[in-house]
Image (cartoon, coloured by chain):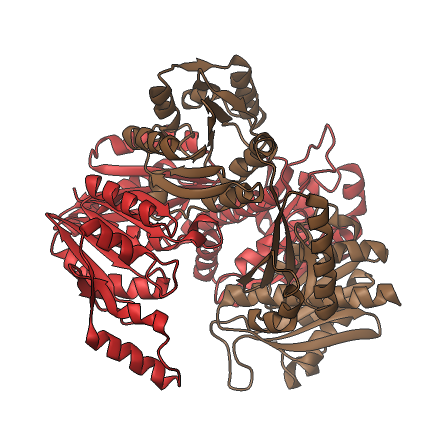
Chain colours: A brown, B red
């Protein structure tokens, strides 16, 4: 068994200002290759502590990852510690210096002197390309063992892991973990479990983990195997069984996001969508436009917070706002019709609710939201009751709205 | 200086299924007492690894905390490791056994045999009351040093820390740490450093950390002192110096967010704001409405993705869209005027750009964004060049837009 140790470096990790999510990512990716992370260490920006942690890690683990401590400021110590440990000097890479200079120039700055050291690396390091930033990753061979050093910025660390480190480590192991993440929304963990756990009983070598978030539960299914294709078809069968049991809750797997799935359906239907938002304040539009290419199907978004604007922009009748209130089925229906008309889109999604934490009444408490979706003369509006936290309410409302739209699009596609 | 090490115990922490938030909580609470957490270690449910980590921690730290590994199941190893390390046996506490029995009986169960061990603790442990669960905390005196062991469930760990451990540690220290986080946006870390590091030179006992994110850099200033009020006024002076050097970049401290600061200024000016967004797709409106009470000043948001919608909803002249293009100073200016008029608000903020990753040209590359803000007859539009990542571009654009609005509001307030 190949054992790994992750070392996180940075005073900000120790003081608790930054949560160490890098070790989680690394451990999961290594696990997929059958490599077991057995120790995690965090040390500050301190030369001796880094050296010490590295020495100890190499005494017990086969793969050691270092994250953090590669920035340009004086408190970043990792390269110094590596030089010191391996007893080598820093080496300047002129081509990297040029690249960094050009990057600064493109943004209209001169290269600050302090950034020069981002072109210097320990002489015995093999450089690993960082496609997401300027600090390169490094690999060090120590006998049979290997040390990888990466920046602490999660996006950059992940790029180097995916593009440089994991491909190298793949050659070292024969077992693979095949894993599929199944994304659901709208059904709580305990009810999901009751609905589907019988599907998993026939597969004793299957590992199932429920990862709940307020926006939905991801079910992680893992199989360890030396035969990837058999494992994958076993997983595919399981997933199709789960989908049949939960057709409305399961919206995708792995890299699928709900906005991406909705966008794909709109594209298939050659249709466009408009949003009309009150309590989500633009979040639904923002999620839809997070997807590259969404200008193909996203037409317009209206954030109508004030009643006056609901009437003026979307034509919600004043008498509806007065008699039924802004948070009502009738208002959301009028918002949908208004958005369809104003934008000239085939589909619309609309929400109105009380995000909180204040503004609730006995009849209409904080967390009450009406959500609607559909096309002209074919609209559905549902009532939801969420919690008391404003941000969570916004996020849960946006997910529920996009899922309602997804179910509608799916039904129209099958027609 | 009193040094601490936190040791997290549990396979679920190593595999990445659970994020280690306990160490963050403990580090922050200790730091407020001037106790510096200098190492964090995570090990699995393994006897030797726990003993090993404990031994090492006691060789370098004065205060050692263990969390996790106290549950009744067979894989929880902490008490065994403590007995083994201190060379003592487990001692049964009959009164605790009775309490656990009664708790099970109240729920209608008989005490499972496996739970008996929750009444057994290493003979040399001083027990620490757990007001939130059944596994007691433990304290061990080792010469001048001290070891605390707590359950891994955050709620229980926090109860024991607050009620038992922190009161004991308070007596050990006379120093306290005072800390302020200064939030900036729009200036890269290295340029911030060059502009302001001279301010810090006069304060040798000041600790400065730069915490960069793509949306801005937070500068964390910490002072360890025996006199909290002197330290606080020293920090206040430093901050006012930094603000003078970077009036446009610094937008707030500690819990301030940019949307909240903008909202407070709008409220002071008794004004309302409207947003007109292209490439950010509603993100600016969503950020503004994340703030509770934002309905006081947020009037309406328009997400005008298609050119047709920019013209129809905001009245951007078709000839401007044709000759200058959607991504241009003229279009953003017209969007601002259109939003001011359509919403009837005093202020507007507008953006148009190429979020990417596709859609760029040589003349207008991916990441080019025009951002504008202001009031009627008093508008400013600036050109920005961001990167290639769609989501980062959206977030950086939204922050830059809100900051431009903030600077405008601030100037109007001083008038």
Residue B343 horizontal side relative to residue A263, left or right: left
* Residue nearest the viewer, comparing B19 with B8: B8
Which residue occupies the foreground of this view, A47 or A204? A204
Residue extending furthest toward the right: A415
Q: Quadrant of residue A249?
A: bottom right
Horizontal relation, residue B33 to residue A186: left or right: left
Q: Position of residue B46 (x, y in %)?
A: 36, 50
x and y, in percent, of residue A54 in the image = 36, 31
Q: Quadrant of residue B154?
A: bottom left
| Front residue (pair B302, B341) | B302
Residue drawn where x is 35% and y is 42% of the image: A12
Quadrant of image for the N terminus of chain B = top left
* Residue A210 at x, y percent in the picture: 56, 62
Which residue is depicted at the point 37% across and 63% down?
A: B153
Q: Is residue A238 above or below residue A307?
A: above
Does B155 appear above or below B36?
below
Q: Is residue B219 visible?
A: no
């Amino acid at each position: 068994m190949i054992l790994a140790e992750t070392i996180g470096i940075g005073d900000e990790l120790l003081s608790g200002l930054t949560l160490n999510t890098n070790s989680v990512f690394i451990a999961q990716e290594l696990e997929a290759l059958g490599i077991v992370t057995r120790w995690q260490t965090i040390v500050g920006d301190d030369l001796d502590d880094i050296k010490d942690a590295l020495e100890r890690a190499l005494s017990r683990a086969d793969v050691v990852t270092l994250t953090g401590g590669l920035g340009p400021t004086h408190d970043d110590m990792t390269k110094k510690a590596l030089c010191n440990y391996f007893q080598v000097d820093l080496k300047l890479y002129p081509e990297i210096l040029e690249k960094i200079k050009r990057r600064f120039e493109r943004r209209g700055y001169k290269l600050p002197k302090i950034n020069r050291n981002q072109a210097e690396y320990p002489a015995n390091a093999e450089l690993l390309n960082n496609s997401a930033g300027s600090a390169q990753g490094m690999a060090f061979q120590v006998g049979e063992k290997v040390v990888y050093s990466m920046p602490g910025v999660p996006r950059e660390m992940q790029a180097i892991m995916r593009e440089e480190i994991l491909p190298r480590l793949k050659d070292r192991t024969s077992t693979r973990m095949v894993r599929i993440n199944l994304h659901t929304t709208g059904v709580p963990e305990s009810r999901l479990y009751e609905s589907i756990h019988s599907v998993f009983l026939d597969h004793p070598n299957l590992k199932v983990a429920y990862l709940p978030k307020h926006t939905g539960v991801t079910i992680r299914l893992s199989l360890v195997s030396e035969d990837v294709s058999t494992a994958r078809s076993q997983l595919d069968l399981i997933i199709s069984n789960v989908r049949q049991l939960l057709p409305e809750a399961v919206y995708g797997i792995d890299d699928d996001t709900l906005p991406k799935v909705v966008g794909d359906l709109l594209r298939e239907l050659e249709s466009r969508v408009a949003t009309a938002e009150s309590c989500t304040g633009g979040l639904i539009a923002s999620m839809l436009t997070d997807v590259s290419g969404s200008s193909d199907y996203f037409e317009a978004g209206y954030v109508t917070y004030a009643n006056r604007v609901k009437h003026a922009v979307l034509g919600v009748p004043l008498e509806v706002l007065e008699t039924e209130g802004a948070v009502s089925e009738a208002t959301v229906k009028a918002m949908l019709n208004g958005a369809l008309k104003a934008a000239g889109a085939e589909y619309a999604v609309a929400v109105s609710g009380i995000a909180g934490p204040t503004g609730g009444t006995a009849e209409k408490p904080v967390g009450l939201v009406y959500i609607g979706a559909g096309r002209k003369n074919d609209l559905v509006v549902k009532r939801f009751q969420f919690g008391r936290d404003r941000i969570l309410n916004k996020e849960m409302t946006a997910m529920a709205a996009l899922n309602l739209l997804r179910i509608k699009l799916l039904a129209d596609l099958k027609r």
